[in-house]
Amino acid sequence: MTGTPLLEIRDLTVSYRTRTGRLTAVRGVDLDVHPGEIVALVGESGSGKSTTAHAVPRLLADNAVIEAGHVRFAGEDLTHLSERGLRAVRGARIGLIPQDPTVSLNPVKRVGEQVAEVLRLHGRSTRRSAPLDAVAVLERAGLPDPETRARQYPHELSGGMRQRVLIAIAIAASPELIVADEPTSALDVTVQRRILDHLEHLTGELGSAVLLVTHDLGVAADRAQRIVVMSRGRVVEAGPARRILDDPQDEYTRRLLRSAPSLTVARPRVRPAGASSPGEEPLVVADGLVKEFPLPHTRGTARTVRAVDDVGLTVHRGRTLALVGESGSGKSTTARLVLRLVEPSAGRIVFDGEDVTTAHGDALRRLRRRAQLVYQNPYASLDPRFSIGEVISEPLRAFRIGDRASRTARARELLDRVALPASALDRRPAELSGGQRQRVAIARALALRPDLVVCDEPVSALDVSVQAQVLELLAELQADTGVAYLFISHDLAVVRQIAHRVAVLKDGRVVETGTTEQIFGAPAHPHTRELLAAIPGRRARAATGPRRSEERA
Amino acid sequence: MSRTLDEDIVAEAALAGPVGHGDWTAHRRFDLARTGRFLLRRPGLVLSILVVAAVLTASFGPGLFTSRDPLTGTPAQAFRPPSGAHWFGTDELGRDLYARMVHGAALSLKATLIAVAVAFVVGGLLGLLAGFVGRWVEDLLMRFVDVLLSIPALFLSLALVTALGYGTVKVAVAVGIASVATFARVTRAEVLRVRQAVFVEAARSCGVRWYGVLTRHVLPNATGPVLVLATLDFGAAILAVSALSFLGYGAAPPAPEWGTLISEGRNYLANAWWMTTLPGLTIAATVLATNRIARALDGEFARAS
Amino acid sequence: MRRYVIRRLAQAAGVLWAAYTVSFLVLDYLPGDPVSAMAGQGADQGTADPAQLARLKAEYGFDKPALVQYADYLGKAVRGDFGDSVATGRSVTSVIADALPQTLELTGTALVLAVIFGGGLALLATYTPLRWLRQALLSLPPLGVSVPTFWVGLMLVELFSFRARLFPAFGNDGLRGLVLPAVTLAVLSGAMIAQVLAKSLSTALAEPYVETARAKGAGRARVHLHHALRNASLPALTVLGVLVGQLMANSVVVETVFSRNGLGRVTAGAVSAQDIPVVQGVIVFGSLVFVLVNLAVDLIYPLLDPRIVLAGQNRWRLT
């Protein structure tokens, strides 16, 4: 790319003052964004990508200090600009799209007012024209029925709509640069896709450059002309998107590419479970499951919402059934129904030939012993006061299996199974990383040698590289112990790696079931096809796939 | 399996350090160096701990601080301002005010401890019952708590004093009952919060029975904030007890309760400033110190690394 | 909305009834016989004349079964009749009504002072970029909640009445006589408001929507007053609802210190004289004030935060 860059970051170093000293988050980062260009800044949590992005309009936390380097924007050094000077740049020339749309709008102000504020602050509208101008901007941001929306409060809008409002705020004054910090990570994939499409279209129209911060290489590959990869505060690799994807130079980039589920072309980690004889009785059969929740009373009428509506499923021994759906599709509730943690409103659950729909007392405890659960958030599912050893041996204690010494021995053995050192036994959960905690949760689930483990989004709170390791571990354990998984996920790319069969849920109903090959190869239901199309990285894959084979030829 | 990427490396480094001995029931490894660093950076907290320690010592062994008699004075030495001989000065009967404060600590602190204990035990049990049992038990108990909260605390204490009569212990019980409602509320909220935590459902789903959930998960995790409240309430109870004894409902006159001392000094406000000023400062310092400690207990240590 | 208010008023009546019952149980049925207490008036109770005791018992209805007594008393209380003061023989209602204006004047002034100074301190402490000023300001509220109220009053008297001779040390006369008692009463409440508001303001200022506002190019003052303050005012408002009752109760101490006439003085006198009907009347009145203030606070919540829907059940619910 020729010409002078619009944004030129040189040798930027940012650190945070903490009670124990300085913590350097960004070290000597160089980065250019040219006019009209989309640059993706990619990295895992703690890589310093967000700090770098926020340092551009100097919207850093109070305890952050820019130690060195400069940020030149259209020839002006922002690191030394006065607060007054910065106010003229923020919003007018640099727009920011923040991370989480659910908390980034002021809850007590109407949407229209919040968009109008940018226009008023920078003199783009008069007091009289601001409300109408705000509606026009909302319309441009793709918000349906903008007149009504402008009069509503943020909590009356869905997450996707709120993100469009934030986009409207960012583009209102037609800035030359938009800094987008993980703009869609909190949204469902199909919404994410539509919003990114629209953002790309808008910035193209306005000629704005975009600095897109993302943890998802797939998103970066789809959207950006250039990719900058960060790790532990440093830029490890930067270059044109195509080059980074096809020919990564840095070891870290390669590893990131290998573990990104959305960019890998079908690489099943599970063994084909061919051995299961057709006549064998399935482990779990659920039929016509319904769960209704009461809604808060409004005007005296009791209403209910159907979270799960006539769901049937079958889990075979030693196999994995994945339940896939977007938020609110009822997948987590279904899992809890199967485990009898939630009482079904209707339907039947048969576990290993025994009807457990209304089991209680000893029968329920037998079920608890044979079916375990791994939670999405490993930070919440382990009692912070327990040591790792106590966490893992808790199920053994609950069922009075063995004495203290033998339980400790079993806990040590289980730690070894999940590839954690035995020294972790005495640690507290807070001393472990997210990936390690999830391993502990898996060890606890396996302590009783169960037949079924329900995994509720077990990897979605983890970084991609850790994700890959945990999935591999789950597959290994299945091969060794013959445990069956009911695997809940919103992420089709993850499901593809681990599941034998897939059930797609939408609004509490199963819309399609089939083997993983069928679902991914020949999806029948439109919703399945929409979900598949929304997996980020498809565009990039479609473009690079053939080329790679040419090179080999 | 290779665990190489950054987040795991960081935690790995933590794991590689010296590991506890084989006995893995020893939960709390007391980290002396860390505690020392924590305290060094907070001179105010250290001072607070010293103040509270001194007041507690005085209340159990006043002889350690003074050898004078708090009840008999030398009339010839009445109204002496603070000096080397009489640190806090003397009162209208020539009694040493410092000795009276030191001996008064026993009475005032006894009252405070009783008040906090009543509030903690009664309120804590009500809250625990409401939070853990739920349903109509919760409704009933919490409506009762709402009613108690609707009566301003001092009014409720005064009503109880009217009914029970005067004296240190009765005042203490009156103050304690007035804060039962707050304890019940906080305990219930904590129990509910913990009961809905994911790790509690996790325990349930791996077969732990209800009493196991209660004793092993809910109680240990819910007591922290209630203990913080108890520390805060300690300061509030000192103030409430001293206010009631200032109003004249505490121990009978010659006994040197802190509030009574100030109320006695009130009559000589114009010519013997020390008789009100110094006891008041002592009370304020004690309350300030317990509040500072409460703040430290409220997760300050856990947050600082 | 109207349904909500009606429902809340019914609830308020329920709370008042319960408060009355609690006070009845505490005052009339705790150990210690109220009649001998009244007859003895705090003196040695063994010497009371048996005939006088019996007469008093009949007069106050203590010879009837407990439930009948309770029903009698409650029936009268509903009509605003809390009986007559044992000490003076005047009706409790008129005793309270006579003392109320002076106490309202005192607590009202104190409330205004507390809101202005407590709120101002919190705003300034969170606004100022000067670290030392912020820390100096934030060290004041913990001090304010740690000093005994009666002692603050005495110190103010010593400094401003006896030494500086600026304000009178006691009495009810005029505006000058109001200054010291109101300041004394305001210290605790002001400190509490400052603590709560400073905390909720710094929480609000750390919210992501504040960053959105700054990214729009809004200045410090605008972010503070336009975006953070309204979000932060809810917890402060909740505290305010509790503080009104507390101010009224603390007037017992302050009016004693400054020898002012008012409800607090009446209460202190009634407790000393074991004048049970007056104490009971004061408690129910305190409860009434608390219930009304909190109803008002609940009605203000939705105006400040549109997410709050008046749900009629427990306070309010976030949607």
Image (spheres, coloured by chain):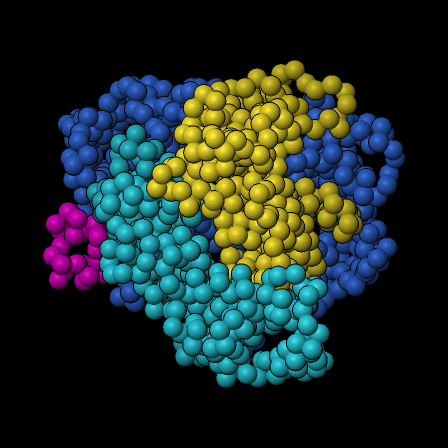
Q: Is residue B292 visible?
A: no
Q: Is residue A135 magenta?
A: yes
Horizontal side of C122 relative to A329 (left or right) equals left
Quadrant in which the N terminus of chain A appears? top left
Horizontal side of A173 relative to C143 (left or right) equals left
Which residue is at 17% across, 58% downward? A130
Q: Nearer the viewer, residue B110 or A520?
A: B110
Which residue is at 38% across, 25% downward? A17
The number of numbered discs placed on residues in the rendered structure image is 0
Q: Nearer the viewer, residue C267 or A51?
A: C267
Which residue is at 67% across, 64% downward? C45
Chain for colour blue: A
Which residue is at 43% across, 77% downward? C94
Q: Position of residue C228 (x, y in %)?
A: 32, 49
Dominant SS in magenta: helix
Q: Nearer the viewer, residue C92 or A162?
A: C92
Q: Is residue A348 visible?
A: yes
Q: Position of residue A372 (x, y in %)?
A: 73, 46
Q: Residue A307 lies in what quarter of the image? A: bottom right
Task: Answer above or below: position of A289 versus A277.
Answer: below
Q: Position of residue C90 (x, y in %)?
A: 47, 77
The part of the chain drawn in magenta is A109-138
Q: Nearer the viewer, residue B290 or B205?
A: B290
Considering every residue shown, the one lying at the far front of the view is: B76
What shade does chain B have? yellow
What shade does chain C have? cyan
Task: Answer above or below: position of A331 versus A374.
Answer: below
Q: Position of residue A472 (x, y in %)?
A: 64, 32
Q: Is residue A179 magenta?
A: no
Considering every residue shown, the one lying at the far top of the view is: B18
